[in-house]
Image (spheres, rainbow, N blue to C red):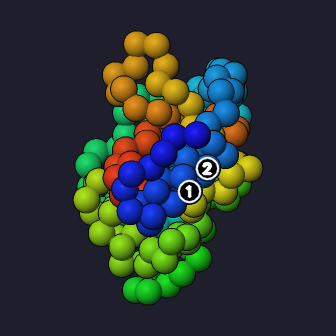
Amino acid sequence: MVECTASWRTCWYNAYVVSLWANFLKPEPAIMNLGVFGTCAAKPGDPLLYGADLETARRICCNNRDYAERYGYWSTTNFPRQLPQGRSNITFYDTVTGDPLFVVPRGRGRTYDQFVADTRKYGWPAFRFEEAVAKNVRILPPKTGATIAADEVVSTRGTHLGHVIGKEDGGAAAR
């Protein structure tokens, strides 16, 4: 057992994050084998929530493992205008299967305003580990030759969701 020399809160939080991380770190690289449409079981459906661009979703979610939509893209959709301030338990779904992926804000008292602040900071919706629906989300180590040297966040059905960044913010899995 490793001794933690920081404050009890920091030690507890670090152990908590490690236990959450373990729920998602399941080496299942076969998840990202080629599916019917890129790595996905099918093409993302039309229309998408919040007026998101279908071609962008198809390119980023199913035919890509390295990149994200452009920084700030989320703010060009209806997303910021359609969600009332302070709303809780907002569910984000897989664009292909409709499976729930993230529920925000959830865990450690993060508020909707903090979710929006993290989203603005990273340039696209930023989720924390405790906000992931564990049965539908996995974190894979960076693939060999990856452009981004960060763990990849994927759905259990092969949809690329983003990369783990901002671990100092509670492990933001950003899309």
Tell me the amino acid under the disc marked 2.
Ser
> Does 78 appear above or below 139?
below
Tell me the amino acid under the disc marked 1.
Tyr
Residue 10 placement, left or right of 89? left
For the N terminus, the quadrant is top right
How far separated are the C-alphas under marks 1 and 2?
5 Å
Name the foreground residue: 22 vs 105.
22
Question: Where in the figure is residue 64, as x and y percent of width and height?
Answer: 47, 29
Disc sitting over residue 19 in the figure: 2
| Element under disc 2 | helix
Q: Does the image show residue 52?
A: no
Q: Residue at x 69, y 22 (%)?
A: 30
- Are discs 1 and 2 less than 8 Å apart at CB? yes
Q: Does the image show residue 30?
A: yes
Question: Where in the figure is residue 32, as x and y percent of width and height?
Answer: 62, 26
Residue 94 placement, left or right of 65? right
Disc sitting over residue 16 in the figure: 1
Dot 2 alpha-carbon crowd within 10 angstroms: few under 14, some 14 to 19, many 20 or more: few
Question: Where in the figure is residue 116, as x and y percent of width and height?
Answer: 35, 70
> Does 45 appear above or below 144?
below
